[in-house]
Amino acid sequence: MNSIQYRPEIHFTARKGWINDPNGLVYYKGRYHLFSQHYPDDTHWGPMHWLHAVSDDLLHWEELGIALAPDDLGFIFSGSAVVDTDNTSGFGTEDNPPLVAIFTHHWNEPGNPANCHEQQSIAWSTDGVTFHKYEGNPVIPSDMADFRDPKVFKNPKGGWGMVLAAGDRVMFYASQNLKEWEKTGEFGPEGNYSGGVWECPDLFPLTVNGEEKWVLLVSMGPFEANHGARTQYFIGSFDGSKFTADGSFSQPEFIDMGYDNYAAVTYFNTENRVLMGWGDNVVYADKTPTAEEGFRCVLTMPRELSLVKTELGGVRLAQKPVEGDVFTEQPAESCTAIPSQLCKIRIRGDGAAIIALKNAAGEQYRFGVNDQNELFSDRTGAGLKDFADNYASEWFGKSVAPRFYEGEWEMTLYIDHMNTELFADGGSRVFSQLVFPTLPYDTISVAGNATVEVYPARS
Ligand code: FRU
């Protein structure tokens, strides 16, 4: 029996049951909304629903219950949500613009999951709480098995744009009213460097050195060479119809070098571009030891995205966690004690260093910089690990990635019970790794030239 709680404090989990991908991330009527893939009746994946929660700060969530449940067209798979400010859909009024959710209906023959198809459907709400499925669903009919996860955004040419995953590529659609959609282009499989089925795409502009570039995210389904499942990104341009990669990458580039950030997508209708992902890895997610606390799986911390020109890696995606006012402004007096299971730890250093979070059971989570100027995260000795072969093996437990800078470095680690999220070199490298220590980590040790500051959660 563990004397530790794995349920985090500033990460979204379902009160009860299973979750996977974040869906329908949207700011509407003064509150952040999130939905997630959800199976309420067990701590395993099952017939998918959308679970709904709201927040004022993206960190503390109030669960509102199920927004969308399976029906005759199938399970409710992943998708997005937009605020239809001009009431182009006619579901609300210009004075009371509707929230419109766009999602995949996944149908399979009962008892025969192989006989399946996926189509796109919509639902709307004018109070941000109760959702009505459109009677004209599906809005994009299909008989394809892998055709899912529509992400809708404002098309730079006017009207609405959509990117969705279709097997080994993404497809782009356009619409004026969210109900009638026309295909405008594709990206992939050429230009792709990773294996796995394409899932949960997103497409959005960011500016670097005054120049607008478009970022395409694509989550790559289970694929051993990717250490399970990861979110790949491409940088390029979007002409309103199709995306063209600028060719600056020659290998798969992932938004997170840890193994617990999948299906990551961004918010609609926020000033900054904010990303959240499923903070688990599909290859072991349904075996993690949280079921006795009544829940399984977690979403990542929200992260503001930017593009940065790095010293060694060209233009890269950078992530800055949204941390609200959770942590103390001043560091604690001790730089070796971890006072609470929710904590922020800042480390600055030069050259190789190993930082370890330790507990009285002899378990430790280690991270740092090696003598090749690479960052690493290693959970192979971090705690419970026998629940799945592919959780803390060498391949799934250790991650190493070259820095995009030379010389001095800084990194910030957020630990929230089972979640560790490490942001290094201005967030140009991120490692999100779940850990399951059997006692809380209470001590930090450092080998190398580095200084540590500990910022506990405010009580
Ligand atoms: C990604 C995914 C999506 C799909 C959903 C089903 O984790 O496979 O492609 O819509 O999960 O729960």
Image: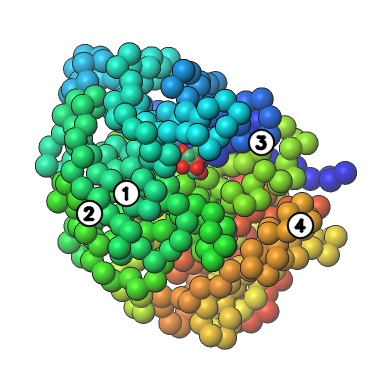
Q: Which mark is residue 401?
A: none
- Would you name the residue on which mark 4 appears? 385
Circles 2 and 4: CB atoms closer than 8 Å: no
Residue depth check, mark 2 versus mark 4: number of the one nearer the observer: 2
Residue 175 lies, with reference to residue 272, above or below; the image says above
Circles 1 and 2: CB atoms closer than 8 Å: yes
Q: Is mark 2 within 8 Å of ligand 1?
A: no
**Which is more N-terminal, label 4 or label 2?**
2
Residue occupying the point 36% across, 79% down:
312
Look at the numbered disc 3 and give the secondary structure of its residue.
loop
Disc 3 and disc 2: Cα gap in Å? 36 Å
Q: Position of residue 8 (x, y in %)?
A: 64, 42
| Residue type of the residue flagged with mark 4 | Lys
Residue 198 shows up from this direction: yes
**Which is more N-terminal, label 1 or label 3?**
3
| Residue type of the residue flagged with mark 3 | His
Q: Residue furthest right?
A: 1
Look at the numbered disc 4 and give the secondary structure of its residue.
loop
Q: Which mark is residue 243?
A: 2
- Would you name the residue on which mark 1 appears? 170
**Which is more N-terminal, label 2 or label 3?**
3
Please give left or right for residue 209 compared with residue 269 in the image.
left
Look at the numbered disc 1 and give the secondary structure of its residue.
strand
Residue occupying the point 84% across, 45% down:
3
- Would you name the residue on which mark 3 appears? 44
Disc 3 and disc 4: Cα gap in Å? 19 Å
